[in-house]
């Protein structure tokens, strides 16, 4: 494992096809659901005291596992004198040091997994923070995430999502499991697909729900589509910040309900907007707290600070007290009409994205550039572990791309060619290899446009 580098990681990832393709995972998930789905489906409706009890038990197990099996955590927790079994109260948990993205990047690969084979199944953050991080996944994690995904759409649809219904994901890559033994089928299109392709796909497959980026939904809306007439009843947006007023306008224009999903690659689903437009935390997917940006002290209900979370379903690369970096508030559970008893998240202010505007006033959403950067790895096999990037548009005639390389060499020409699949050939692309990315605004954004539409 000492000689395991980015190139060998790319080779390891090839095993994923064999692992996923060689077994009927949908049937396995179906069998799990027959046994456990009622319990999973009812979890958000338990009393909050019971929810907390389940969370603390799970966290205690995860922390012990990480301490005993993951070198990063063994070193990190040994420094504070941690011993197995020490997490007995929430106060014990809050004494654990915060984990930062840089630690996961620097610890790749030796320090963040138990064994090399764990990277047979893995994921990489899409770069919403402007920095790539690699996380291994266990197949059981994927099963649990798939089942929680079914529950998500039951919750957000107001109990109007059934085994025979389909979902269309307009996203970066398809999910590993695209149906549960023929039920809960998922259709997929990449965000590089045209709106005409999407409309054709909707007419052919008749999805009840669409899941996509807010900027892509706005692109669909610009075509004057009535999604309700096409059989769509709900759109879930994610990966970019969108305001409730923005979603209200889309609801009116598209004639369907539009709800938000707040999630991340590291922490999975964090909070879901219910039909009554309240964000409820996904308390069995991750445990979330809010900390002071300066002191990192845990804050109380209603106090605004930084989101820190623990992934409750992935043991392969444990994510414990992870500094998500977004600003938000948490309030105690409320008597919501949807019946959810999980805590409530408010004023989420993260992942704000810009769009690039061409001389012809074409709007290219930031999500497209995020997908592009992600596919430097997925499609072009460019080693991007630890690479940081930032697109900045200062005028309609040009685009700047700043890159901070990690220890791996990257093919700049491949990156140039890929960017020109998005922007017009006449737009000048300036690539700059730098030591630090430009600092603009209080929160780092991977895509920044200083150009206003029509200007």
Image: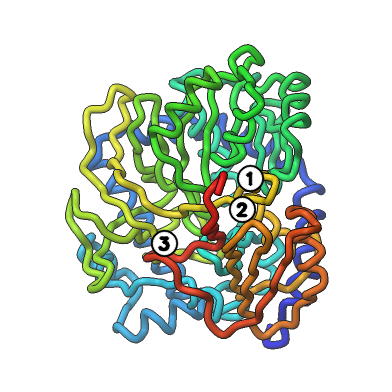
Cα–Cα gap, marks 2 and 3? 26 Å
SS at mark 2 in the image = strand
Instruction: Judge whether residue 96 can be spotted in this image.
Output: yes
Mark 3 Cα shell of 10 Å, populated few (<14), some (14-19), many (≥20): many
Nearer to me, 46 or 368: 368
Mark 2 Cα shell of 10 Å, populated few (<14), some (14-19), many (≥20): many
Instruction: Judge whether residue 15 can be spotted in this image.
Output: no
Which residue is at the far top? 229
Query: In the image, residue 330 lies at what x, y percent?
Result: 26, 48
Q: Which residue is mark 3?
A: 324
Q: Which residue is mark 1?
A: 363
Which residue is at the far front? 455
Nearer to me, 284 or 411: 411
Taking the spot 39% from the left edge, 32% from the top edge, the residue there is 245
378 vs 245: above or below:
below
SS at mark 3 in the image = strand
Where is the N terminus found, in terms of image quarters?
Answer: bottom right
Q: Are marks 2 and 1 in contact (CB under 8 Å)?
A: yes
SS at mark 1 in the image = strand
Taking the spot 55% from the left edge, 66% from the top edge, the residue there is 130
Q: Which residue is mark 2?
A: 356
């Amino acid at each position: 494992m000492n000689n395991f580098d980015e190139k060998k990681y790319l080779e390891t990832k090839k095993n994923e096809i064999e692992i996923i393709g060689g077994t009927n995972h949908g049937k396995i998930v179906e069998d799990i659901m027959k046994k456990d789905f009622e319990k999973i489906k009812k979890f958000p409706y338990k009393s909050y005291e019971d929810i907390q009890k389940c969370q603390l038990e799970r966290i205690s197990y995860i922390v012990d596992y990480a301490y005993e099996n993951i070198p990063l955590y063994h070193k990190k927790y040994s420094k504070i004198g941690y011993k197995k079994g020490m997490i007995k109260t929430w106060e014990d948990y809050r004494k654990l040091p915060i984990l930062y993205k840089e630690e996961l990047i620097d610890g790749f690969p030796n320090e963040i997994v138990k064994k090399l084979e764990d990277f047979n199944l893995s994921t990489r953050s899409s770069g919403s923070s402007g920095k790539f991080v690699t996380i291994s996944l266990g197949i059981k994690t994927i099963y649990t995430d798939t089942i929680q995904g079914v529950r998500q759409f039951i919750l957000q649809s107001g109990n109007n999502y059934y085994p025979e219904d389909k979902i269309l994901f307009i996203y970066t890559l398809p999910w590993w499991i695209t149906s549960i033994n023929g039920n809960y089928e998922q259709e997929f299109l990449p965000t590089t697909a045209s709106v005409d392709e999407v409309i054709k796909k909707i007419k052919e497959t008749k999805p009840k729900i669409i899941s996509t980026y807010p900027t892509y939904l706005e692109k669909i809306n610009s075509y004057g589509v009535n999604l309700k007439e096409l059989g769509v009843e709900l759109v879930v947006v994610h990966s970019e910040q969108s305001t409730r007023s923005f979603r209200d306008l889309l609801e009116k224009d598209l004639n369907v309900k539009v709800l938000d999903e707040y999630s991340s690659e590291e922490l999975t689903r964090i909070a879901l907007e219910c039909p009554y437009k309240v964000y409820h935390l996904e308390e069995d997917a991750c445990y979330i707290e809010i900390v002071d940006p300066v002191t990192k002290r845990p804050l109380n209900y209603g106090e605004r600070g930084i989101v820190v979370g623990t992934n409750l379903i992935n043991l392969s690369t444990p994510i414990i007290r992870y500094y998500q970096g977004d600003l938000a508030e948490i309030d105690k559970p409320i008597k919501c009409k949807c019946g959810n008893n999980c805590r409530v998240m408010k004023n989420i202010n993260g992942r704000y994205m810009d769009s690039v505007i061409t001389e012809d006033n074409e709007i290219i959403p930031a999500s497209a550039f995020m997908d592009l950067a992600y596919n430097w790895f997925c499609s072009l096999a460019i080693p991007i572990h630890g690479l940081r990037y930032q697109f900045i548009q200062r005028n309609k005639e040009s685009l700047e791309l700043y890159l901070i390389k990690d220890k791996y060499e990257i093919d700049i020409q491949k990156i140039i060619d890929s960017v020109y699949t998005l922007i017009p050939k006449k737009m000048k692309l300036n690539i700059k290899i730098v030591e630090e990315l430009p600092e603009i605004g209080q929160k780092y954004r991977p895509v920044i446009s200083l150009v206003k539409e029509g200007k």
